[in-house]
Amino acid sequence: MSVLVMKFGGTSVATLDRIKRAAKRVGREVANGHDVIVIVSAMSGKTNELVGWVGETSPLFDAREYDAVVSSGENVTAGLMALTLQEMDIPARSWQGWQVPLKTNGAHGAARIEEIPTDNLNAKFGQGMRVAVVAGFQGISPEGRITTLGRGGSDTTAVAFAAAFEAVRCDIYTDVDGVYTTDPRITSKARKLDRIAFEEMLELASLGAKVLQTRSVELAMRYKVKLRVLSSFDEYDETAGTLVCEEDEVMENNVVAGVAYSRDEAKMTLISVADRPGIAAAIFGPLAEAGVNVDMIVQNISEEGRTDMTFSCPVDQVKRAEQAMAQAKERGEIAYHDLVADTEVAKVSVVGIGMRSHAGVAARMFKSLRDENVNIKVITTSEIKISVLIDRKYMELAVQALHDTFELEKAG
Amino acid sequence: MSVLVMKFGGTSVATLDRIKRAAKRVGREVANGHDVIVIVSAMSGKTNELVGWVGETSPLFDAREYDAVVSSGENVTAGLMALTLQEMDIPARSWQGWQVPLKTNGAHGAARIEEIPTDNLNAKFGQGMRVAVVAGFQGISPEGRITTLGRGGSDTTAVAFAAAFEAVRCDIYTDVDGVYTTDPRITSKARKLDRIAFEEMLELASLGAKVLQTRSVELAMRYKVKLRVLSSFDEYDETAGTLVCEEDEVMENNVVAGVAYSRDEAKMTLISVADRPGIAAAIFGPLAEAGVNVDMIVQNISEEGRTDMTFSCPVDQVKRAEQAMAQAKERGEIAYHDLVADTEVAKVSVVGIGMRSHAGVAARMFKSLRDENVNIKVITTSEIKISVLIDRKYMELAVQALHDTFELEKAG
């Protein structure tokens, strides 16, 4: 019997009617002969409510209690989905994380999956169960406490189940109908991609395209899980959504697959830092300890033993970064003249596995931005990505210009 | 170290502020030197919402999924209470039913507690934990599924923990400040009782005084748990609320402790039933199978081999009772002329352990009702209780008259 994994996000199970609609999709796959593992999120808004209550109760909360509280929304949806399927005469039951058990490490709030034993579910499939509805986002720690996998963790739950059960496919139902060349709210020329390579999806996910949790893509890549993102609001057909797959399965040959952006970035510059061996560690060690997610780093050319060091981070971490630097200065670990924060910047990136074999992408990108008079403040590159930091007010303009330049409205 | 059990009902944990207030009470008991086991209900309204969703999804629901869904509200409160206590620097953690584990039988929706192992919690108390916050109402079945104990089940959870841990006391915090001689909404003369015997509380609980779940009182009686009902809204003092205790600890010597009522009763009469051996079994067997909770039963004097049989049941079970009787008649198991339902009746009862040693309580009761021109339709008695079925419109009048007759406004 072939196992299919279907994941429904919060908006797809937001009401009893939507749960019913999702159950009908599950019913079709059962009729197609699949045993189905359904992964459900909490009804939309529920997890935010619980997170709010925890934050209000205890600003520096015990992550074990946070997990015990915020995991409860998924349990409700799992039970309701199982009941809905039973009403359709489909043998189904719900499973909470600890019942599977989905074993994680003890990193509460952002736990990593360590093992998903298949014997419990397989035994039930063997007895005639056709659908296992599993509460997403949650697991159990070695100490027997409830853990959660971080926001968006139900995607990762789904992929991990698909890997453990060697599923034929892992379908992620969400409120968008697939992965786009860029955000359709920024340009109406944005085009839905039929396929995208894992590596590209990974860059897009981490760059702010909120379709899939980054870790779920990593996991799918590692275990070669066929991952499909599709809308729970459209009628189903075989070509629906976007298939996230191995590079050689991607038929298109556009050099650039998509343009991503991240709006709320800040650029911070330490002016006149003493340029000595170990200075980078002295700066970025304290920042990491303070929980600042440093993204891009640029070091200016050194003059007379001093240099400027520029880095970017999310705009809401600027205060934390300033504090960490001031304290390091006080402790005598670093010396600098000033720390200047520019909180009005955004990051725009072009991503594509085609860049590996095509030169000149960077040059085309920079020319496109220059033609629009957009000044580039920082540049970083990887094998399949080029990112630039620009003034936030030019962000939409830059995305539109790059989308045009690389002709992303056309399938390659 | 002495263990104290404190239970907070839904209204006592309805908001974050109320959880904080409840936590302060817990803090005082910790300061008094107790290790505390706190049992929490769901925030008020939450369980009803979940029950509503289940009913809407699946009218004849799978009770295992019902339990998985409706138990989730308690998990939220348990985590929030643990966090609140931690904010007060009290070492606390939450426990869900399966983590304790609170073992029940497999009767989903109304499971019975079979065992509460004490080693897990005691190990944590030994390591410095001062408060274990336990999600009420829930347990785990022999098959590893989540069970619930029926509405009001958190009371039973509390008493069971008090018994298992040989607690010095079990304090039930609720939205009333104790057990009253009758419902204060019916007569302002109603007086709070300082103490009440288990047997009396049991009769009052099952008669419709919704202060405590009946099973929790049974359990407290069997294991001699000192049970105190008190308001979470008043300031605490040693004499607060009502202590439910052994008969010989009750100081008052009123013959009647209280007047209870049950509004939504129905009186059903099978007219002209063949009076033969086994006829009672032939009638009440099918009713029990149909899930009709028959309360009072009266058989008229037999004439010429035929008799009338009268019984009472909750008014919302009348249809079910009629159907069960009609089917039994069709199958030829019973013969009767007609089944008459009077759905406009209520039950009023006087309860008191003093009745055992005092004659004439029934006579005083009937005279009191006669003086108010209240017609008695059915009478039943037990050792410590007399109940009458009367027209519903006289219910309040009857309660007031009986409260006056037995001078319940005065402490005995």
Image (spheres, coloured by chain):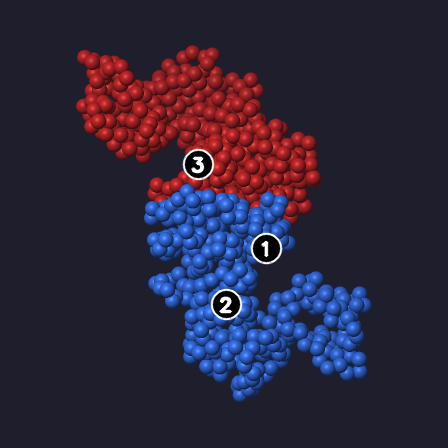
Chain colours: A red, B blue
User: In the rendered view, would you say B227 is above or below A228?
Assistant: below
Mark 2 Cα-neighbour bin, 10 Å: few <14, some 14–19, many ≥20:
some
Mark 1 vs mark 3, CA separation in Å: 33 Å
Q: CA distance from mark 3 to mark 2?
A: 47 Å
Label 3: chain letter: A
Can residue A72 be seen here? no
Q: Secondary structure at mark 2?
A: loop
A279 sits to left or right of B34: left
Q: Which mark is residue B246?
A: 2
Q: Does A110 sit above or below residue B97?
A: above
Estimate the x, y position of residue A296 in percent, counting from the top left: 34, 22
Instruction: Tell me which chain the residue with mark 1 is part of.
Output: B
Residue type beneath disc 2 = Glu
Q: Which circle, 3 or 2, is nearer the viewer?
A: 2
Q: Secondary structure at mark 3?
A: loop
Residue flagged by tag 3: what amino acid is it? His
Q: Chain of mark 2?
A: B
- The disc at residue A108 is 3
Which mark lies nearer to you, 1 or 2?
A: 2
Q: Residue at x 46, y 14 (%)?
A: A356
